[in-house]
Amino acid sequence: MNLPAPTTAPSSLQLLQQMQALLVERDQKLVERDQKIASLEQQLAWFKQQLFGEKSEKRLIENPDQLSLGEILQGKPKEQEVPTETITYERRKKSRPEDCVTDQGLRFTEDVPVELIPMPAVEMQGEDADQYEVIDYKYTYRLAQRPASYVILKYQREVVRHKPSQTLTTVAAPSGLFDRSFADVSFIAGLLVEKYRFHAPLYRQHQKLESSGITISRGTLTHLEQRAGDLLKPIADEVLNSCLESQVLALDETAGKAGRKSKGKMQKGYFWCFYGDQDEMAFTFSTSRSGRVVEPYLKEFGGTLLTDGYPEYDRLCEKYPQITHAQCWTHSRRYFVKSQDAEPEATKEALDCIGAIYKVEDEIRKAELQGEEKREYRQQKAKPLVDQFFNWHEKQLQRLDLVKSNPLSKALGYVNKREKELRVYLDDPNVAIDTNHLERGLRCIPMGRKNWMFCWTEEGADNVAVFQTLIVSCLLAGIDPYKYFVDVLQRISLHPARDIRELIPRIWKEKFGANSLKSDLDK
């Protein structure tokens, strides 16, 4: 009969080692738990900030010596009633700003219509009116408003009869922008500006038309918008070509829904935004966020590409060595802002240093430095600060108490991968320190997204890209988009296709801005 081998009892040393291993494992799990809790608390704080907090990136510097209003009022004894006295005195009248039109501080230009409302003096209406004469007038101004108004242009065409032959003739009907369309070019231009500059969806414009007593189907409004987009697309494409000819090109993307993905769901897409060094912007739409979308545009590009931290741009710049990649300091700064609660002291050092770097840019802007002077100023003032920042960055990376989940670790890691790209602006005066100018320009897409929500089709999203390309480029060039659309929608059918570049806003302003085509409403 085979008996099992006797087992030896563990020694006290083995028991001690097992206990130590269990304690180490327990401590490790506690540390991991604490790190996970801290990470979840940070995520919760971020979501609260997005829902309820301020979105401004301005730093609010707290003064520990300054009392809050509650602290000031707390413990303050109740004031006793103090007797008062009336004091009369004279003082100089405050001078009005030069552009003020009225004593109340109302400002308006000569283009604003003014309606005169006569107010005759009571004395001039009595029995003794002949005893008075008007020697001057005083004016009081009030700002008033009418609901949005529409005008019907009624063309009166004479019908004449030739007496000998008894034949009838009449003046030809005025030509419109589109065949068999009742819409004047001013209405179409207003339709586009209302939707894409002021973000009023077509259904709201349809409601305004109805409240004004005009009945038009919403489908008609959509059809007019589509036909205008077909006319203007070649000009928008030429704006994009102009941007791609820049030496410094800023590039970014923002989300927008277009097309139906499934029942009750819309397809997510992206508007790609190009900002050229001639201060013009171009938008394109794609359902993909892959770098392959913009790769065809960048194949022939040779210059500096300024972007945020999206990795697809790194891949493209590595694939095409003729492109110099520069990255945005503002995006780097945002990572340090997120680490303020976890690492307040270290974060303050980083933000103070970045703030000093931006102060140099503010000095350059105020001094209006350009070219070599701007580069030399950056080398003398900004480069030592950038070196100081990355020296501090290296010391922080050597800290043993920083775990990967710490927001400061993420900020340091983000900057560590992009040091070369963040230094590019120091050697090239044409490169901006950040992409803020681009983000301001593409803000029209998120604003529209909050109003018209989505595009029903991808073709509609392409039209959004066309209209925003022209409107944003107009605003950057100091052009009224309404005036531009009224002119270009009439001019494009007669303009040679080989000279389409003349119709992009920047050049249109020089060639046609002073003598633009008008609508019959303004003639």
Image: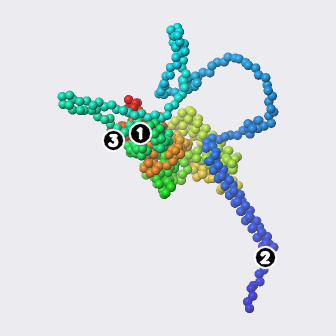
Q: What whole-number distance in Å separates the C-alpha atoms at marks 2 and 3?
A: 99 Å
Q: What residue type is labelled 2?
A: Pro
Cα–Cα gap, marks 1 and 3: 14 Å
Question: Mark 2 — residue?
Answer: 10
Q: Are marks 1 and 3 in contact (CB under 8 Å)?
A: no
In this picture, is 325 found above or below 91? below
Res 354 visible = no
Closer to the chain start, of discs 2 and 1, is 2
Q: Report x, y in % for residue 31.
A: 72, 59
The residue located at (57%, 40%) in the rendering is: 379
Which quadrant of the view contains residue 490? top left
Which quarter of the picture shows residue 17? bottom right
Q: In the rendered structure, which amino acid carries the disc numbered 1? A: Ile
Q: How is the image coloured?
A: rainbow
Q: Mark 3 points at which residue?
A: 179
Residue 412: x and y in percent read: 63, 51
Q: Nearer the viewer, mark 2 or mark 1?
A: 1
Q: Give me the residue at 49% from left, 22% from top.
A: 116
